Amino acid sequence: MEPCPSIQSMQSIQSTASSSVLVPDVMHQHKNGNVSQRDVEGARVPDNAMSTPRRVLLLASSAVVFLLVLLTSLVVILFMQVTNLRNTLNSEIYAHSKDFGEVCLPCGELQMGPFEEDTPDLVLLEKVRSDEGDICCAKSPNQTKILFELLYQKKKMQEYRHDMLKSEHHVDSAPKINTVSAHLLVSGVQPPVADKSSGRYPIKNWSKDHVIANITGISFQPDRLRINTSGLYFIYSQVYFDRMCDQVTQEANKPYPIYHYVYRFNVIYPNGGEQLLMKSVRTPCWTQQKALHGDYTSYTAAAIRMAAGDEIYVMVSNISMVSPVPEASFLGVFKIS
């Protein structure tokens, strides 16, 4: 019969059990009284092993807190940007509304393109004539909403076009062999216009399907060409006017000038985005008593540096005089460098 453990050994084992964890085999021996102080100390699980889950939990909590702080910062930054944009828009609107007593802006600052159909909502606003151009005003809550939406869309398009131009600077500038050119011909009689008081009418029936027409590397619409890549371009246009002197008044020495314009439009440009590139004018008809010529061909051309997104279009002072002969009126462009 083996002797029982001493009281001192039992107290040591109890103290050890209170601060450590024993493996199952040692606990079984301790229950039978067959364990020594050395066995108990060797079977302890280190205290730092018990703290590992706590460390994982602490790290996870720290990560969650960091993410929350980061998300909060991003929300604050976004809110500040939106607030600054709104304040800028409010300042611009207020600056233009003082003279009219209502929310007003130059119509050019709301236009998304060179023609009325590019911004159909403009007709829903009140239009005021001024020496500086047309002013679009909002008097009702619905009109104010429309004005703000148009202004916001214009700002977003301007940012997009600026970013597109910046991205071009990172593209390899080595010479490209691909051709970038277009040659469009007028297609038939010009459609009638409703407003005959503007003095400028766009040619809207260009064709790229004629046997001598072509287009490569440039976007096409029936009333315009759109430049896809920035560079130096040679732009040319010809308009053939006929039946000119039929509309000359009976007054002696009354001039009847004919205008031929080439414009470009891009929201990144000032004054609403429209810029005059070329202009040709002639006054061939003076009186009915002199020998008059009923036909006139206007040609203009220039080498101009264009930006991606520029839209090229032709306007004339009298759309009814434009001849329907395809080969006589055309619009062309090709990239030089």
Image (cartoon, helix red, strand yellow):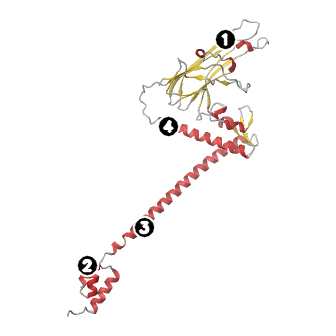
Viewer-side label of 1, 3: 1
> For residue 326, which quarter of the picture?
top right
Q: Which residue is mark 4?
A: 166
Earlier residue among tags 2 and 1: 2
Viewer-side label of 3, 4: 3
Viewer-side label of 4, 1: 1
- Going by the numbered disc 4, the residue's amino acid type is Lys
Say which element carries label 3.
helix
* Label placed on residue 42: 2
Say which element carries label 2.
helix
Q: CA distance from mark 3 to mark 4?
A: 45 Å
> For residue 61, which quarter of the picture?
bottom left
Earlier residue among tags 2 and 3: 2
Position in image of residue 259 (x %, y %): 67, 19
Q: CA distance from mark 4 to mark 1?
A: 46 Å
Q: Are marks 4 and 1 in contact (CB under 8 Å)?
A: no
The residue sitting at 52% across, 27% down in the picture is 218
Decide if residue 5 is on the left or right side of residue 307: left
Q: Which residue is mark 3?
A: 58
